[in-house]
Image (tube, rainbow, N blue to C red):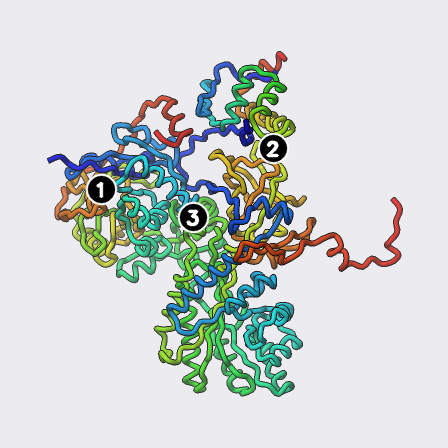
Amino acid sequence: MEKQRYERPVIIKLESNMPNKFGLRTEYKPKTHIDNVSVKDLINEYGSPLFVISEKTIRSTYKNAKKAFTTRYPKVQFAWSYKTNYLSAVCNVFHQEGSWAEVVSGFEYDKAIKNGVDGKKIIFNGPDKTEKDLTKAIENDSLIHIDHLDELYTIIELSEKLNKKPKVAIRVNMDTGIYPMWDRFGFNYENGQAWDALNKIMRSKKLDLVGLHTHIGTFMLSPQAYGTAAYKLAELAIGIQKKYDHEIKYIDMGGGFASKNTLKGAYLPGVDTSPSFDDFSEAITSALINSDFKPDKLPLLILETGRALIDDAGFLLGTVISNKRLSDGKRTTIIDVGVNILFTSFWYDHKVTPAQPFTQYTEDTVLYGPLCMNIDVIRENASLPLLNKGDNIVIHQVGAYNMTQWMQFITLRPKVVMIDMDGKTHIIRENESIDSITSFEKVPEYLKKFEL
Amino acid sequence: MQKRKLNIAVTGLNAIDSPGPGVAVIRALREANSFDVRIIGLAYESLEPGIYMHQLVDKTYQIPYPTAGIETLLARLEYIQSQENLDVIIPNFDAELYSFIKLSPKLKKMGINTFLPTIEQFEERQKINLPEFGEKYDIRVPHSTAIYNIREIYGQASEFSYPLLVKGKYYDASVAYNADQMKTYFNKISAKWGLPIIIQEFIHGTEYNTTGLGDGKGNTYASFPMRKQYITDKGKAWGGISIADKKLLELTESFISSTKWRGVFELEFMKNQKNEFYLLEINPRIPAWIYLAVGVGQNIPEGLVNLAMGNKIKPFKEYKVGKMFIRYAYDMIVDISEFEQISTYGEL
Amino acid sequence: MIKIKSNIAISDSGFIFNPANGESFSANPIGIEFFNFIKQGKPQEDIFENMLEKYNTDKNTLEKDYSDFVQTLNQFQLLDQDAEKEA
């Protein structure tokens, strides 16, 4: 006779709390497969922890987003936000789908060029662009989004030196009723900074003002704020048309759309409450269409959304190291996934699902990472099924920022694999080894020997 | 003629000192003239009194908290539907309404009817949106603002004078008399209900409430005002009386017609010394004192079920003034075997 | 020797009621088995042997889980402290 699956014994005190309506999240179904590939097989082949990216999910999410905008507005262009996930394989899926590149540093710029993106289709954002970076961008006819006046003056100087008319836009920050207001980037709309910068650009006659850009915040749950922002950019564009008889070619609404993750402190799960692409699109496109643009002169609408396009496609697989109890009897589970590779656990209650079947019994559990550091907490409190040592778990919606903000700390960073459209897996980033880390180091000769 | 028997599921069985409306709703449904009922209780916790009131509730199922997500709730409701063949669900908690509204098309396909506000109505009347709501529908509301960070308190407080109200997004409200108290309440309420926290002008005066039923097209099916006579330390009415106040009725009917409200609601007003009514809160659900509706001759839960079932009903034009409700607590005797049943199997 | 208080029983559903202080508890199926074995006064080794026959697990896991379970019973005041002292 086959033996039954073992589950650790558990006894729970029935607390007679009256409804506080603020219960714990429990996942009710195991996640045994990603795109029909077994989680166990993935871990057996590539090790644990392991990042897994579903190409199918990227493409379907992208198509869904594109459809939300193109059905409402005539000219739409997406630009992949490199900082959200700049693994080349991921970037190239977006480029194959038609996305331009949106970069915020010389490093990201070079990466886009290396990936084969035409310089004309790179949007260069951010406060830190060196003269060298700007020279390259000007020579390649890239779209430079100016963040501050010092940069504006540098670009004017370079245009003279290179005898080229750089294609520029300014980044505009504004009050959209959202807190906090991201007024550290770009030029303010309400206090006239934006107009001041636009006047300087137009009067210099050295720059080709092609667009207007804004990026109102991150993990935005209010589509209406985008409507307000789009309306204000449209006002600016129409003002420039009137004043200088100059046509603005595109309006870049930036990114910041919330993904389906659940923010810490949120009452309802993000999957139920985050606005859809249709919601964002409706707010943005109706603001533009209802503005004073002539119907045949509507500018190109550029979107740099990152998080909402990639979060769902990323999974992080892990393994249970141990079950323990704290001094007060509180259940804790240690897994091999730490905050060093799951940065987003600082602000999300990530959905964590066992990779094998389980019963309906659960225990309130603190989920710790493997680092010997007190901050290494993946979930402060989760109602989890009874996991055994060696069981596998799947952490959901980790595609955004984790594979760029992760750090090599205490442990080595794991492999990243992509499951392609046919269900075949490809390593898209190797795991680190002791050598890959020490190869960057140099030990002075006199420190090479010691006796203990 | 034999009346049709409807299977109706009701949440909010927590008839405690800060009660949910479920038990009152069930009592009203049991007195309905147009149908008979089998009542299915839906409970979150195993000690909700309604679970054990077998003369009112035929069977109870535990359901997952809204925080578990819509998919989980749907799975549970599908199971319950396979057992009970529900005709109608009446959700009664603010915190669960979002999920039920989102689920209502799926529930309809399963044969379960609801009659809830639209998601737009639900969002628009959120406490955090009250200032915009007042402006849009030309209803006087207290000055209020939503804050996300404790640092904002000092900036915002200058717009207000003490005392002021510190409110949670869904529940809880405390009166703060100084900045320290405001900070304490901010922390306390945000820890429980999340952000934002609403800071609201405190209007001195007398509290009035109205309830009613709108058909979603702007027509009023029922509405009447009530004045709270005795308020518990939790701010809940323990006694109240139906009154004749034309201004309140007007305000309520204009609320229904301008918002095209769908379903039952409760409006909380404060009348200041100058006899001006301020709208403090819009509850998008049945109030806990709804049994008074039966007392005044407007069985609102019955009307709600009929609208949910697509039946034609005649609007109530009159109500009895001077009907009081006086709440009381009642100790039931329950054997532990019943508690075992609900807490281990989730059904009783 | 570990002994569960004589007035405490577990139902088939895993429900445990402590009549002395009015507290109640709930156990999962494996918890019920452990509880009943302990209640019957079965020695540890016999319990493990029984479990190993039935379930896909190993002795280390059982030992660890057993002692964790007993600790929890103790924390919930379900064990007969006098019996332990006598032993």
Above or below, A74 relative to B210? below
Classify mark 2: residues with Cα within 10 Å, few (<14), some (14-19) or many (20+).
few
The Cα–Cα distance between marks 2 and 3, rounded to whole angstroms, is 31 Å
Q: Position of residue A270 (x, y in %)?
A: 45, 52
Q: Residue at x 41, y 56 (%)?
A: B146
Q: Residue furthest top?
A: C86
Same chain under badges 1 and 3? The reply is: no
Same chain, labels 2 and 3 = yes
Residue at numbered disc 3: A268
Residue A95: x %, y % from top left: 54, 68
**Circle 2/circle 3 CB separation < 8 Å:** no
Q: Residues within 10 Å of mark 1 (few under 14, many from 20)?
A: many
Q: CA distance from mark 1 to mark 3?
A: 27 Å
Query: Residue B260 shows which numbered tag?
Result: none
Badge 3 element: loop
> Residue flagged by tag 1: what amino acid is it?
Pro
Q: Nearer the viewer, residue A26 or A58?
A: A58
For marks 2 and 3 on the same chain, the one whose residue lies earlier in the sequence: 3
Left or right of C27? Residue C1 is: right
Chain under callout 2: A
Note whether C52 is above or below B292 in the view shown. Answer: above
Rendered-image quadrant of the N terminus of chain A: top right
Q: Secondary structure at mark 1?
A: helix
Frontmost residue, B258 versus B186? B258
Q: Residue B116, image x and y in percent?
A: 28, 49
Q: Which residue is mark 2?
A: A327
What residue sits 56% from the left and 35% below the top? A331
**Left or right of residue A248: residue B83:** left
Chain under callout 3: A
Q: Amino acid at mark 3?
A: Leu
Q: Which residue is mark 1?
A: B301
Look at label 2 and name its amino acid: Ser
